[in-house]
Amino acid sequence: MDANKRFVCVALLFFLSLCGFSQTVEKSFLFDKAPLPEVVQTVVESFGLYLSYDPYIFKNSSPVSLQLKFSSVQEALEYIVSDDFSFQILNEYVIIKKKKKDMPEPDLPSSNLEKRIFYDTIIVRKTETFYDTVEVESVKNIEVYDTTHIQKEIMVYDTIDYVIEKEESRKKLLFYLGPSIWRRDGDNMNGALLGFSYRHHWKHFYLEASLSYQYYLQNISFSQTDNLVDLKIDTISTFFIIENEERVPVFVIDSTFNEREVVREVDRTNSYHLLTLAVLVGKAFTVSERVDVGVNFGVSMDWVFQASEILEPDETSDETPIELSDYRVPLHNVRLEVPFTYKSKSQQAEYYLAPFSDLGLNSDFQNSTISSERYRFGVKLGVVF
């Protein structure tokens, strides 16, 4: 029995020493400019407890830097937060509150008093009244704050290139000029044109109307044979007669006419002034971001309002001067255009290049036997607005 008692005593002493050793285990902490809520959270959780506090109380707290060892949560919190905060350990929770400095405790409503006094009236013999005072402790509500981490949405802006596509206007105005060649019956007339066009887009097609002034020159050279008649007078005899007592000579002459041909070279320049109205239907195709190509087809009409022209003579006729009234008005043509449009980098300006050709449908003159074939080729260079 004595041996058993000794064994139990030794085991009890060993167990108590272990418990004491476990209670005095120190925990090391190292913080370098860490936020105060993070420090408190780490310390409390390291001792196996839960932290409860209002996050607003640490709003203006300073960062903490320390390297110490603590054996209990009370010791750690007294060192870290005792100056500005108070703490209370309630079961498994550590409640942190901010101290109120130099402020009296507010008068709490009667419903929050910790103690209430109730008077119970007891009637005894001799009809004397005795008051039995009973102190009742009311239940006080305790606010427990559970610290939660709220993840805020952060908007990250990524810089991207965004091109705002401007809706192209359906109405466009084109101004142009360029060289042109008017070919008639195998003869070329070089000239230039100046004009403008109005274009209206409709779905995938567009309608274009243009008005232009055209000026042409034609240099011609030809040989012309002229018949010249020479008059030759010969004196055959001479005699005298008396008139008014004066001697007057009289000549007898013989006249002869000599006809001869003279060939001369003629160099001259024919000039023409025209107004041209064209109505075309076209469709544009996008080749690249800045280049468009189109196809236009329609009709054009020419009015010759001033001209100085002489047609070259042939074997059956002499040179033929042309009067303004001899021209047919208007001259009808079929036109084909292939316009190219180039857009600048800023998309503010468009440049226009359009080769075109006309095929005459009627004669240039009222007398259709004079001329019947007519072609025109040119290039328009301009700007689109």
Image: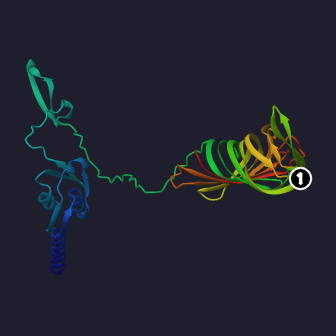
Q: Seen from this angle, which residue lies furthest right?
A: 316
Q: Give the percent coordinates (x, y) of residue 172.
A: 62, 43
Q: Give the percent coordinates (x, y) of residue 334.
A: 80, 47
Q: Quadrant of the C terminus?
A: top right
**Residue drawn at (16%, 37%), measured in percent from left and top?**
114
Seen from the viewer's position, the closer of residues 53 and 231 is 231
**Residue drawn at (18%, 48%), measured in percent from left and top?**
97
Q: Is residue 69 left or right of residue 368?
A: left
Q: Seen from this angle, which residue lies furthest front?
A: 245
Q: Is 184 located above or below residue 331 in the figure?
A: below
Q: Is 353 located above or below residue 106 in the figure?
A: below
Is residue 271 visible from the viewing direction of this image? yes
User: How did the renderer colour the structure?
Assistant: rainbow
Q: Give the percent coordinates (x, y) of residue 284.
A: 69, 51
**Residue drawn at (15%, 51%), measured in percent from left and top?**
85
**Residue drawn at (18%, 31%), measured in percent from left and top?**
109
Q: Give the percent coordinates (x, y) of residue 346.
A: 50, 52
Is residue 186 visible from the viewing direction of this image? no
Q: Quadrant of the N terminus?
A: bottom left
Dot 1 corresponds to which residue?
259
Q: Is 69 located above or below residue 286 in the figure?
A: below
Q: Residues within 10 Å of mark 1 (few under 14, many from 20)?
A: few
SS at badge 1: strand
Q: Is residue 319 left or right of residue 86?
A: right
Seen from the viewer's position, the closer of residues 259 and 341 is 259
State the image quarter where residue 273 is shown.
Answer: top right
Q: Is residue 306 left or right of residue 66?
A: right
Instruction: Say what amino acid the circle numbered 1 marks.
Output: Glu
Seen from the viewer's position, the closer of residues 332 and 79 is 332
Q: Is residue 256 left or right of residue 158?
A: right
